[in-house]
């Protein structure tokens, strides 16, 4: 297992030299943030980021993400050109030895929360979600600068895509994903890259848009499309943890043993009601995800991929990119390290 930390490049308020001070973190998860969606990621730009990461003693372990253009998800006629570009980006990263690519296939929006700073009595805050609040969001007036949202779209473009998806149901979206994977996975295989799809977050339809990577049945279907370790999953315990019907530990064991989980996002969530949750402190007792069992299972199946703490709370007065402060994510790393040492030593001595 390799522990990694997400770094948003030079504009990240948390420099690599701070990340260096967190024990056991050896990998960096990053991306290019100045390439338009759909364009090829140039090799020299990737090299540039890789050099900075390596100069601080880290490995550039994962690219998260190369965004998939909406026209690919919609199955529009120009998708072949865009998929060719995507393939070239995979070649470029693979040739540089970056072996894991996290991506998602969520229409229009990436992850969505309805409150970016839910406050707690102890002075901390974190991201939270309440499905009933979605209807209060008006796309004509909303600011489009929420993290993970389609910040690159103008309001007109956003409306265009929202309308375009009225003709795309879950089944069509699956077929479009299949089309994409049949073209990119052979390239990923050739260049030693493992593609790892991120689950939809939250794992259900929002704003009437189709969403498909939501549960175990979906993952079964995904891995069957192409039987290859390059066609894998980013197992996000927080995203799947929002689906109370999913037995996370069972599913991790199943797909981990199939060698389909190259990358893990480690995070806990706590439900208030159905489709209403907040991102809790990492340890098991504070949320609905059994983090202890997750780690125990990973050790048991000999997980040798990359794991990163996912969103943390904002604590000790820290401000910044919601979910991506330094302090609580560092606490998440230490919790993971503690579980790992405790569980693996206990297993070894029995
Ligand atoms: C949120 C992240 C997601 C993830 C993408 C992967 O914090 O987990 O934005 O990076 O869905 O494509």
Image (cartoon, grey):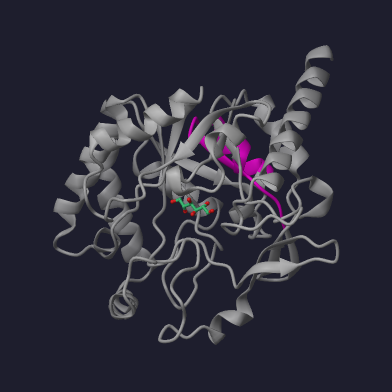
Q: Is residue 190 above or below residue 73?
A: above
User: Where in the figure is residue 295, as x and y percent of width and height?
Assistant: 71, 34
User: Where in the figure is residue 302, as x and y percent of width and height?
Assistant: 62, 23
Q: Residue at x 39, y 66 (%)?
A: 150
Taking 224 as reference, is 2 left or right?
Answer: right
User: Where in the figure is residue 110, as x and y percent of width and height?
Assistant: 45, 61
Magenta stretch holds residue 157: no
Q: Quadrant of the N terminus?
A: top right
Magenta stretch holds residue 259: yes
**57 and 112: which one is in front?**
57
User: Where in the figure is residue 189, as x and y percent of width and height?
Assistant: 30, 29
Q: Is residue 331 above or below residue 296?
A: below
Taking 116 as reference, is 71 left or right?
Answer: left
Taking 259 as reference, is 286 left or right?
Answer: right
Q: Which residues are magenta?
A: 249-269
Q: Quadrant of the C terminus?
A: top right
Task: Find the residue positioned furthest to the top.
Answer: 349
**61 and 42: which one is in front?**
42
Taking 60 as reference, is 186 left or right?
Answer: left
Q: Quadrant of residue 151?
A: bottom left
Q: Quadrant of residue 95?
A: top left
Q: Quadrant of residue 331?
A: top right
Q: Residue at x 62, y 81 (%)?
A: 132
Q: Residue at x 73, y 50 (%)?
A: 289
Q: Residue at x 35, y 52 (%)?
A: 67
Q: Is residue 261 above or below residue 125?
A: above
Q: Is residue 133 above or below residue 78?
A: below
């Amino acid at each position: 297992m390799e522990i990694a930390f997400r770094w948003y490049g030079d504009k990240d308020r948390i420099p690599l030299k701070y990340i260096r001070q967190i024990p056991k973190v050896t990998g960096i998860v990053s991306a290019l943030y100045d390439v338009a969606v759909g364009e090829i990621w140039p090799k020299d730009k990737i090299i540039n980021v890789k050099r900075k990461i390596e100069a601080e003693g880290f490995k550039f372990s994962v690219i998260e993400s190369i965004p998939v253009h909406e026209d690919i998800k919609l199955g529009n006629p120009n998708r072949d050109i865009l998929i060719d570009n995507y393939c070239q980006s995979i070649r470029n990263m693979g040739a540089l030895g970056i072996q894991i690519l996290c991506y998602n296939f969520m229409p229009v929006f990436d992850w969505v929360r309805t409150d970016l700073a839910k406050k707690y009595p102890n002075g901390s805050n974190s991201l939270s979600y309440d499905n009933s609040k979605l209807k209060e969001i008006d796309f004509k007036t909303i600011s489009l600068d929420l993290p993970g949202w389609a910040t690159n779209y103008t309001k007109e473009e956003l409306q265009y895509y929202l309308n375009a998806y009225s003709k795309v149901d879950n089944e069509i979206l699956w077929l479009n994903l299949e089309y994409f994977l049949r073209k990119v996975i052979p390239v990923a295989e050739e260049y030693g890259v493992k593609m790892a799809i991120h689950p939809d977050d939250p794992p259900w339809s929002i704003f009437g848009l189709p969403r498909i990577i939501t549960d175990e049945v979906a993952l079964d279907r995904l891995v069957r499309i192409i039987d290859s370790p390059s066609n894998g999953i980013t197992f996000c315990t927080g995203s799947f943890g929002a689906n109370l019907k999913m037995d996370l530990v069972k599913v991790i064991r199943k797909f981990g043993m199939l060698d389909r989980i190259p990358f893990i996002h480690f995070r806990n969530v706590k439900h208030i009601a159905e489709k209403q949750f907040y991102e809790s402190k990492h340890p098991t007792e504070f949320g609905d995800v059994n983090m202890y069992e997750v780690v125990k299972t990973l050790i048991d199946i000999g997980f040798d991929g990359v794991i990163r703490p996912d969103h943390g709370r904002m604590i000790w007065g820290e401000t910044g990119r919601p979910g991506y402060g330094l302090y609580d994510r560092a606490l998440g790393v230490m919790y993971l390290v503690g579980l790992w040492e405790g569980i693996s030593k206990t297993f070894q001595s029995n």
